[in-house]
Image (cartoon, helix red, strand yellow):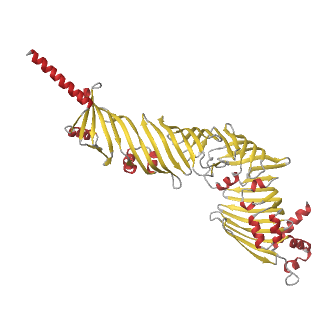
Amino acid sequence: MKKFLISLTLLILLIISILILYLSFYGYQTDRFNKIIKSEIEKNQKIINLDFKKTSFLLDIKKINLLVKFIDPKIEYKSIEIPIKSLKANLDLVLLIKNEVGIRDVELETNYLDIDLLKPQISDSLTSKLIKSNLKKIEKAKVKFKSSFNFDEKYKIKDLIISGNIKNTIFKINLENKISSLNSNFLFKDNEIEINGLDFDYKNIRLQNGVFNISNKKNSKFLKGKSKILIKNDHEKIPIIKKKFIKGDVFFLNTNLEINKNVNIKIKNLTLKDSENFFQIDNVSLNKKFELNDFKKIKVKTKDNNKVNNDFIIENKKNIKIKGSVFDASILLEEIDNNKNENNFLKKITKNIEIDFNEVMTSTDIPLNNFRLVGLIKKGSLEKISAKSEFSNDRFLDISLKKEKKTNSSVLEIYSDEAKPLINGYEFFEGLEGGNLFFTSKTNKNKNSSNLEIENFKLNQAPGFAKLLSLADLKGLTDALKGEGISFDKLSIVYQIENEWMDIKEIFLIGPSISILVEGYFDKKKNILSLRGTLIPAKTLNSLVSKIPILGDILIGKKTGDGLFGISFKIKGPTNNLKTTVNPVKTLTPRFITRTLEEYKKKEAR
């Protein structure tokens, strides 16, 4: 009997050992527990519906756990079917024996699913209005998840870790801007998001191999990361400074920023660089409208055509100080003109400003040296400045801006011994060489009155003017324009701008060879230019001056055919497709005669 009991015990132990070994290495599949598992999940998770064919059990003898794999699982979350690739969990046998929650280390992996299916459910579970708003901007995306988590005693999820991949994403920032072809891996753990392998296209740049970390601390979000930026097309540029990017250029980005609960953005540090260019931003604060609140330092160094064209630092201390060896202002006037009506990025800034550049490059071969400026920025706009610089020995530039107390108008005055560097960016002045420039402008709200005068200059190879002379059949002047150029004593332009409308009161040119008087308008909104004017050769004007005592005879002529010779002309149309017509004239308007006499008297007085 004793032998029998010993044998039976050994047999039972052997069978148990075999079962344990079998379950440890091969596992066991069954559908006997399907109803129990489903009912337990439905009891504790009302919004989740789990279905599966069988369960597979694999024993972990060291941890006294059963690894449960669900065969052909299907999950519905809020009535949306989630394409499941695999689902498994560990059952703690000790806890199950104690009738406690023994399910732990649940692992769930999905196949790719369309983000549109999950948008309503994700949105319902979010409290952040910002995240909800951004979720709506995702036009297209496919995403797959791999998650692990545990349950507490009330079957609430804890220790959640989510990793996955998102691909073929289109994110619409606004009507004009969108991010496309976005692909990335991600990991959510301990209230942090890690992103790696981030690639996307935005306009003419391609961000590659981005690695970023997003964390939440004390009601703020922190983002740190780095990536490679590839330039996809030529001629992209940074505003204000002249920096062109060439297709194939590669830059490296490093960033560290904070977004607080009021959606203010603080860029603690941002650098963008390659082997020849360097941009650095330190402690720049933006509000939710992306307006500048404050900044500490901005450093810029760039090359253009293998030559350093920008090298300066902007520091914000008691005053704003901008100092450097060189600044490229080639496109500065164009940028200012294009952005006049846009929102003022700097409107939160009110401070004194000091600028000190050894050299200021212009769009001509005439640079400025030793540029110095002091002034006041009030709510983002220059309210008062005084600036001086020199082109070469005894050739200077003076700029002043001040406020009129009575009218609250801004009065800008510019005097320059070299006209070309200040006007070369405007097509109207193409071909102008030499000359002294004096410019005055008074601005009040949306209305601007300006007067530009340039003295003692030449027009050389000016396409628009050449076309007018050719149509007027003034061959000698046309030939001169193509050769040494046509000299002028003075150009005067008087105009007013209100909103998008420019009323051109007068464009008057007078010189030894020819004189022109023009008026008209420019509708910036419709891009329509309309000019009408009169052109008179110099010999006619000389005749006019010599015959002043008998003015009536000059205007009408003593005999038929004796009147003055000249042409009237009209220029009208879109600025890229102007039409010019000319007609001969035999009489001059009193205004033309008056303006001509005024200039002759000024010339004689000098």
Q: Is residue 301 visible?
A: yes
Question: Does residue 184 sit above or below 189 in this rendering?
Answer: below
Q: Residue at x 47, y 39 (%)?
A: 195
Residue situated furthest bottom in the rendering:
560
Q: Position of residue 187 (x, y in %)?
A: 43, 38
Q: Position of residue 354 (x, y in %)?
A: 72, 41
Which quarter shows the C terminus? bottom right
Q: Is residue 99 visible?
A: no
Say which of 197 and 393 sits in front. Answer: 197
Q: Quadrant of residue 74?
A: top left
Say which of 68 and 540 sits in front. Answer: 68
Q: Position of residue 211 (x, y in %)?
A: 50, 38
Q: Position of residue 181 (x, y in %)?
A: 48, 49
Residue situated furthest top in the rendering:
2
Q: Residue at x 63, y 46 (%)?
A: 346
Question: Does residue 125 sit above or below 404 in this rendering?
Answer: above
Say which of 280 and 65 sits in front. Answer: 65
Q: Is residue 105 left or right of residue 187?
A: left
Which quarter shows the N terminus? top left
Question: Does residue 367 sit above or below 37 in this rendering?
Answer: below
Residue situated furthest left in the rendering:
1
For the image, the number of numbered tags is 0
Q: Quadrant of residue 36?
A: top left
